[in-house]
Amino acid sequence: MFEDETPVAWQVMPRHAPVGAADGSEIGTSESLLADLDEDIFHGIVMKRKQDGEKVEIPARRITRITTRRVITDLTAGEAESLAPYRER
């Protein structure tokens, strides 16, 4: 799925790009990175959930691919609905 898209490093993740579940359905849009740029450590992303517009955190371990057009996760739609709200630190 989405194999024709160009993969990119997390540092250049497109903002407001669609975020997809494991089955390819859209579960939200990317809002920002959760990372330590100085140490080159990727923690995850903040996603605006499609269902209710709430901002939630997706840990890096759940992100399977980032392309020039979207972010792909291994989440199911149900798991995306139960993600904890994002809280700025």
Image (spheres, rainbow, N blue to C red):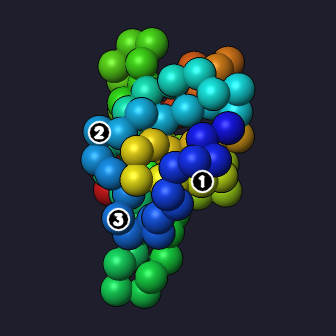
Residue at screen point 33% across, 51% down: 14
Of the residues under marks 2 and 1, which one precedes in the sequence? 2
Identify the element where label 2 is drawn: loop
Tell me which residue sits at (43%, 27%) in the image: 28
Q: Residue 18: x and y, percent?
A: 42, 33
> Against 8, is 52 above or below?
above
Which quadrant of the figure contains the N terminus?
Answer: top right
Judge by depth and name the residue closer to the eye, 42 or 8. Answer: 8
For label 1, the residue is 65
In screen coordinates, is 59 left or right of 89?
Answer: right
Give the x, y percent position of residue 21.
62, 30
Q: At x 40% / y 45%, what residue is drawn?
A: 69
Q: Amino acid at mark 2?
A: His
- Which residue is nearer to you in this view: 64 or 68? 68
- Which residue type carries mark 3? Val
- Tag 1: Cα neighbours inside 10 Å, few (<14), some, or many (≥20)? some
Residue 46 against residue 21 in the figure, above or below: below
Residue at 34 percent of width and 86 percent of height? 38
Give the spatial CA distance, label 3 vs label 2.
Answer: 12 Å
Q: Earlier in the sequence, mark 3 or mark 1?
A: 3
Circle 3: element type? helix
Identify the residue position indicated by label 2 in the image. 16
Alpha carbon distance from label 3 to label 1: 12 Å
Q: Secondary structure at mark 1?
A: strand
Q: Are marks 3 and 2 in contact (CB under 8 Å)?
A: no
Q: Quadrant of the C terminus?
A: bottom left
The quarter of the picture where residue 25 lies is top right
Q: Which amino acid, by three-letter code, is at mark 1?
A: Arg
Mark 3, residue position: 12
